Image (tube, grey):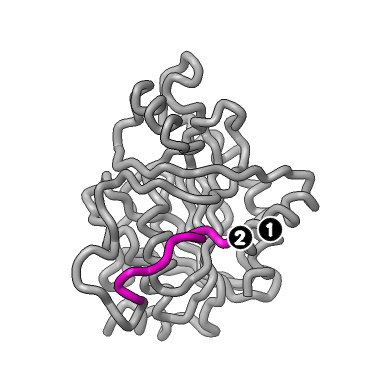
């Protein structure tokens, strides 16, 4: 039995929208109505989440009546996974018919105008991981050999998010996300370099999933929670506990925002 067949046998109706939750942002998974939960350990072939702040569970429930899959935890390259393994969940979702996906992450703010605790819509990305999930033989059943990436993050979905945010009193700004391998945080010199090439945010995830989603014809909304200023922006050392703490502070706002956005993506 394939992973997709396993999930199809466990969940009805099939999810229409999927949400991937980043470090410290897992609370949304607990907000779904009529939720069913399966641990990643019990899903055949599913990469396990080992990072702190990633619960490692697949949840299907309803958001205002819309069947929604939530991936509470993801696989990262710094855990020893390949880009293909990091994108495994997205490709599986595509195989069971999901067309819309929201990717969330915790990110460092390179743009000095972004403040910790702020939610930023990803407008584009820079892949500095040194890997691409599409490397190797192309799976023609999912998408073309050379997929277009000129609108990797849907303009339509960003407009929906901004309107939804405004109804909550949130001004959702946009930024370019740079993905680096980690797990060490970036040096001040690396942050200066990232700023010079146009990055506003930096993190260690999301890009393999975005590439795989676009390859499979899915539309993507990316949301970064700025958990800290990147190295050298201010005189302060970086600590993962800070990332988790800001995620905890923002969970209520993120849940409200996602519950407004999800029903509009079907």
Q: Nearer the viewer, residue 21 or 217?
A: 217
Say whether residue 90 is visible: no
Magenta-colored span: 144-154
> In the shown orientation, is residue 188 left or right of residue 108?
left
In the structure shown, which secondary structural element does the residue marked by tag 2 occupy?
A: helix
Q: How far from the left and from the top, in percent, is residue 149?
A: 43, 61
| Residue 122 shows in the view | yes
Give the position of the C terminus as an image quadrant: bottom right
Q: Which mark is residue 155?
A: 2
Asked if marks 2 and 1 touch (Cβ < 8 Å), the reply is yes
Q: Position of residue 168 (x, y in %)?
A: 77, 49
For label 1, the SS is helix
The answer to whether residue 113 is left or right of residue 185 is right
Residue 23 in the image, given as x and y percentages of width and height: 45, 45
Residue situated in front as seen by the camera: 171 or 7? 171
Q: CA distance from mark 2 to mark 1?
A: 6 Å
Q: What residue sits 37% from the left and 71% below the top?
A: 91
User: Residue 146 colored magenta?
Assistant: yes
**Residue 235 versus residue 112 in the image, above or below:** above
The residue at 45%/49% (across/down) is: 125
Within-10-Å neighbours for mark 1: few <14, some 14–19, many 20+: few
**Nearest to the observer: residue 196 or residue 223:** 196
Residue shown at the point (54%, 37%) measured from the top left: 226
Q: Is residue 118 above or below residue 86?
A: above
Residue under label 1, please give it: 159
Where, quadrant-wise, is the N terminus in this rendering? bottom left
Which residue shows up at 77% across the image and 50% down it?
Answer: 166
Q: Is residue 118 magenta?
A: no
Q: Residues within 10 Å of mark 2 (few under 14, many from 20)?
A: some
Give x and y (percent) for residue 73. 41, 55
Q: Quadrant of residue 169?
A: top right
């Amino acid at each position: 039995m394939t992973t997709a067949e396993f999930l199809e046998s466990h969940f009805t109706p099939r999810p229409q929208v999927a949400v991937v939750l980043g470090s410290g942002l897992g609370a949304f998974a607990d907000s779904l109505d009529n939720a069913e939960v399966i641990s990643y350990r019990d899903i055949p072939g599913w990469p396990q989440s080992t990072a702190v702040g990633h619960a490692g569970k697949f949840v299907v429930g309803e958001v205002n009546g819309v069947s929604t899959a939530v991936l509470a935890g993801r696989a990262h390259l710094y855990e020893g996974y390949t880009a293909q393994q990091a994108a495994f969940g997205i490709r599986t979702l595509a195989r069971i018919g999901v067309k819309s996906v929201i990717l969330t992450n915790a990110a460092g703010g390179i743009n000095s105008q972004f403040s910790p605790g702020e939610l930023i819509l990803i407008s584009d990305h820079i892949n500095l991981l040194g890997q691409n999930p599409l490397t190797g033989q192309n799976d023609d059943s999912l998408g073309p050999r050379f997929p277009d990436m000129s609108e990797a993050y849907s303009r339509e979905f960003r407009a929906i998010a901004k309107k939804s945010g405004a109804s909550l009193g949130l001004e959702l700004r946009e930024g370019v996300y740079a993905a680096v391998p980690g797990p060490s945080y970036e040096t001040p010199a690396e942050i200066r370099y990232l700023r010079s090439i146009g990055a506003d945010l930096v993190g260690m995830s999301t890009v393999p999933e975005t590439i795989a989603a676009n390859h499979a014809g899915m539309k993507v909304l990316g949301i970064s929670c700025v958990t800290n200023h990147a190295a050298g922006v201010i005189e302060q050392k970086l600590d993962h506990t800070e990332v988790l703490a800001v995620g905890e502070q923002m969970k209520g706002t993120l849940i409200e925002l996602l519950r407004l956005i999800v029903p509009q993506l079907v």
